[in-house]
Image (tube, helix red, strand yellow):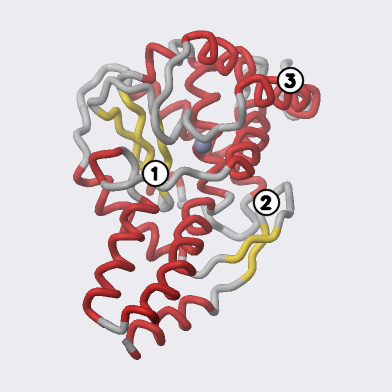
Amino acid sequence: MRLLLSSLFALALVGCQNVPVTGRSQFILVDESEVASLSAAEFAKMKKLPSDPRLPKLREIGLKIVAAARRDDKAGVLPPASKWEFAIIDDKSPNAFAMPGGKIGFNTGMFTQAPTDADIAVVLGHEVAHVICRHGSERVSQVIGVTIAAAVADEATKKSSERTRSSWMAAVGLGAQYGVLLPFSRSHESEADYLGVLFMARAGYDPAAAPAFWSRFAKSGKQTPEFFSTHPADSTRVKQLQAWLPEARAQMPKRP
Ligand SMILES: [Zn+2]
């Protein structure tokens, strides 16, 4: 127990940080690199399609988005370009994710919802925004807060640390097969939407693809975990995205 608490206190020193662009302050109890290594272990287990012909395009768009996001990365959260790993996941549900540390997964089922380069940029802009905002670490920190209380009540060291570990796994794990998924909050989703359209615009994609993507998806009536479930109500989201378009368009590269 003493060991568990002392390591948690050491982690707590990481403390308060700010979200890029929005400036919202967040309390983070974990070291980003620890979350990244845990994420990498999960990512390694996923069923990827390394020879899918769409992979080079996905990587190309993804790296453009990452380069565009870097301008706001004052805290150095985004890994260098060489560290990013892009994968097409053999899964028919329309889902995508970006893990701390630069692991990006894009399900085969997402390509039917996001057929064009601009659509893919909508999805990747949103996901890279989750990474630069450290939403994963913030979510893990919330879980740890709850877990500390449980651990103190428990007094069974082994059981408590096991519980901490599984909570971490749940918090960073993506997809039902990796455990219970803790969804991002609505404010995280709105933040990722906002930064996502800025990043895609800077990368040269028309941000108008974002509200179009979401209204199309709303009409299809499909629901899946993570990417679509806790997102703001579709009509609110589309309205918000439309309101951000002028700001995003102003950041598009000038054409010669
Ligand atoms: Zn999201």
Rendering coords of residue 250 (x, y %): 79, 26
On residue 20, the disc is: 2
Q: Which one is closest to the eye, mark 1 or mark 2?
A: 2
Q: Secondary structure at mark 1?
A: loop
Q: Is residue 23 left or right of residue 180?
A: right
Q: To which quarter of the image does residue 196 belong?
A: top right
On residue 57, the disc is: none
Q: Residue at x 67, y 35 (%)?
A: 194
Q: Which one is closest to the eye, mark 3 or mark 1?
A: 3
CA–CA distance in space, label 2 to label 3: 21 Å
Q: Secondary structure at mark 2?
A: loop
Return the residue nearer the eye: 86 or 221: 221
Q: To which quarter of the image does residue 226 belong?
A: top left
Q: Residue at x 55, y 24 (%)?
A: 122
Q: Earlier in the sequence, mark 2 or mark 3?
A: 2
Q: Residue at x 24, y 20 (%)?
A: 52
CA–CA distance in space, label 3 to label 1: 30 Å
| Type of amino acid under label 1 | Trp
**Mark 1 Cα-neighbour bin, 10 Å: few <14, some 14–19, many ≥20:** some
Return the residue nearer the eye: 248 or 176: 176
**Mark 2 Cα-neighbour bin, 10 Å: few <14, some 14–19, many ≥20:** many
Circles 3 and 1: CB atoms closer than 8 Å: no
Q: Which residue is mark 1?
A: 84
On residue 242, the disc is: 3
| Type of amino acid under label 2 | Pro
Q: How many marks?
A: 3
Q: Is residue 217 left or right of residue 47?
A: right
Q: Is residue 206 visible?
A: yes
Q: Is residue 30 visible?
A: no
CA–CA distance in space, label 1 to label 2: 20 Å
| Type of amino acid under label 3 | Gln
Q: Earlier in the sequence, mark 1 or mark 2?
A: 2
